Amino acid sequence: MKVLVTGHQGYLGTVMVPVLQSAGHEVTGLDSGLFAQCVLGPAPQDPPSLRVDLRDVSVEHLAGFDAVVHLAALSNDPLGALAPQITYDINHHASIRLARLAKEAGVRRFLYASTCSVYGAAGDDAVTEDTALRPLTPYAESKVRVEDDVAAIADDSFSPVFLRNATAFGFSPRLRADIVVNNLVGHAVLTGEVRVLSDGTPWRPLVHAKDIAAAFLVALEAPIGKIHCAAFNVGTEMNNLTVADIAQIVVGVVPASHLAITGETGADPRSYRVDFSKYRDALGFEAAWSVRDGAAELYEAYVSYGLTRHDFAKTFTRLTHLEALHSSGLLDKSMRWVRAAA
């Protein structure tokens, strides 16, 4: 298939593109390049690509593709809280526009990267795709809106599927340090301390970036009748863990590290366990990576590639990276390029 991957220069896209290519698909990327330089280790080999802001996509950009894999988003809760209107403009409005243009261009399949955070404060019971959605942040709310609005335009010629990813972890050449496992391992490597700012009790469902890529490949190649306009949780029950559980795993992986649960930010209302059986039963998808294996992978990469405190806190943290681009005059207030980065 000819596949357009939006956000191919992001944390997940950089991992996903080679997986799709290895399966024989012809991949083109579409990205504005906000995180293209956020690389740890050898530079990744990008596919042929379109340097286009998601808000500026035209039907001509989408012509000739069999499928769109839509990953591009401002994917950070603190950023969403800081600039909620920009989050809605990019994550919601531009995503709906992309779907409508894809349909107009004759694209049959539309794979949307949603999130398990749409469940919000769900307590201790494992949520399913039929559980009421209770998004607590602009980021999660934007994902709910896209699911609803894209489902409304589905028909026999346009088949969306909504993949609700658990919280991602694991190494990517374009690293993110502001997601829980990656963050805790980084702090442990750089300071010797596994530092938890909450009380450690919230539940988090977790899934490795490579498992997300594998899940998207399954959906891309599945019979349309099995996935049409459906939502699937992506992850594995073995990775439903509390933040304190995750921290203990990291202590066991990073030599000479110790745990500090400060509780300074209090209880986090975002707490949910997730049932992943629907995707497993429908299409046989099994996530393979445990949090322990992913933490070990991150530890090895951080040490091997010489992760520094500066890059951990600045380059690989979404909010600080975008603030730096803005303060340098490269981005305007709407997160559009004023001039290209060097």
Image: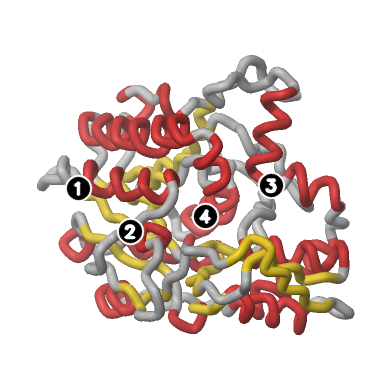
In the picture, residue 314 is in which quadrant? Answer: top right
**Is label 2 or label 4 in front?**
2
| Residue type at tag 2 | Arg
| Residue type at tag 4 | Met
x, y percent for residue 10: 58, 45
Earlier in the chain: of badge 4 and badge 1, it is: 4
x, y percent for residue 282: 25, 74
Instruction: Identify residue for label 2.
Output: 134
Badge 4 marks a residue whose secondary structure is helix
Tell me the distance, in whole angstroms, between the alpha carbons under discs 4 and 1: 24 Å
> Contact (CB < 8 A) between labels 4 and 3?
no
x, y percent for residue 214: 46, 65
Tell me the distance, in whole angstroms, between the alpha carbons under discs 2 and 4: 28 Å
Q: Is residue 188 above or below residue 95?
A: below
| Residue type at tag 3 | Thr
Earlier in the chain: of badge 3 and badge 1, it is: 1
Badge 2 marks a residue whose secondary structure is loop
| Residue type at tag 1 | Ala
Earlier in the chain: of badge 2 and badge 3, it is: 2
**Is label 2 or label 3 in front?**
2
Earlier in the chain: of badge 1 and badge 2, it is: 2
At 58% from the left and 42% from the top, the residue drawn is 9
Q: Residue 16's mark? A: 4
**Is label 4 or label 1 in front?**
1
**Number of dots carrying numbers:** 4
At 52% from the left and 72% from the top, the residue drawn is 202
Q: Is residue 146 left or right of residue 260?
A: left
> Contact (CB < 8 A) between labels 4 and 1?
no
Q: Is residue 109 left or right of residue 308?
A: left
Q: Residue 317's mark? A: 3
Instruction: Identify residue for label 1.
Output: 151
